[in-house]
Image (cartoon, rainbow, N blue to C red):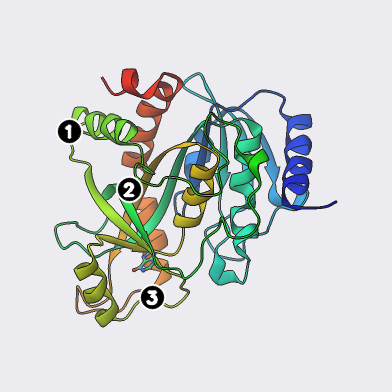
Amino acid sequence: MNDLFTQAQAATDFIRARFPSTPKLALILGSGLGDFASQVADAVTIPYSEIPHFPQSTVAGHSGKLVLGTIGGITVAVMQGRVHAYEGYTMEQVTFPMRVLGLLGAQRLIVTNAAGGINTLYGQGAIVAISDHINLTGSNAALGPNEPRFGLLPGSGQRFFDMTTAYSPALRQLAVSEAAQQGWELSEGVYIGVLGPSYETPAEIRAFRTLGADLVGMSTVHEVIVARHMGIEILGLSVVTNMAAGVLDQPINHEEVMEIGRRIAGQFTSLLTAIIPKFGEPAQMAAR
Ligand code: HPA
């Protein structure tokens, strides 16, 4: 039967044949952040188009390659580009790569995205650690029959699963401390996930602020939901590529989103390359 699990296993087997090591950590690089994949040493690069059942990105700035290798001695699997529900993909397709990263053996995930800044304390170009999310996309990636075989880590793969600490406080603390050591403050904030592809209206942004959101974006929440279903520990990082609609008296455009990603690439790379080696340790120890 060619069900989701069988398809994810076929993709996993295909990747393992090219890269037999087990990645400890998975990274998903969001809009404008894909260049970080060049940090991977001894890289094996596989275009999504070659991987069985992998969806193809249709958005500028998402190159669509899986890069496997090491960063700071840690074996990593890096997704350079992702697909989004607004491209017309189903929840299963959007989260298929995340399922495969889990089956490859990743126990931790760094998920990144470009986001609009709702919290006016953030400036354009700020990097923010996601402390929690609000899923306002209207769907949930764990919909459908539960597949316990995705629960590879202890206690995971349940029909109903906890989202209390979806974004690991210990991993976040690790990132906050490292940023402080590098001389800047990594703020924390709540990410509200929306469907897109239109940017929001100013009225929506005011409503989201009232709901408790600091950041808005069109990705991440679905990947985080299935990663938690699999028991994976998560660090989420947003880059504030623009202030959300109505915060400033100007329209939002995608080129600006891409440009800011490139502008903060150095800072983003320094943070990630410093924290990734610590992701090989248990989180409590790594956070010290
Ligand atoms: N809204 C939604 N998604 C986004 C934004 C935004 O303002 N900026 C980058 N991704």
Residues packed near mark 1 inside 10 Å, few (<14), some (14 to 19) or many (20 plus): few
Q: Residue furthest left?
A: 121
In-image side of 79 versus 133 (left or right): right
Q: Is residue 265 above or below residue 247?
A: above
Q: Secondary structure at mark 3?
A: loop
- The kind of residue on which mark 2 rests is Ile
User: Which residue is identified by label 1?
Assistant: 183
User: From what the image shows, is residue 39 above or below residue 93?
Assistant: above
Quadrant hosting ligand 1: bottom left
Does residue 175 appear in this view?
Answer: yes
| Residue at point 32%, 48% (across, down) | 264
Q: Position of residue 16 (x, y in %)?
A: 74, 31
Mark number, residue 163: none
62 relative position to 137: left or right? right
Total residue callouts: 3
Q: With respect to residue 153, does 282 lie above or below?
A: above
Q: Which residue is mark 2?
A: 264
Name the residue located 39 percent from the left edge and 44 percent from the top edge: 166
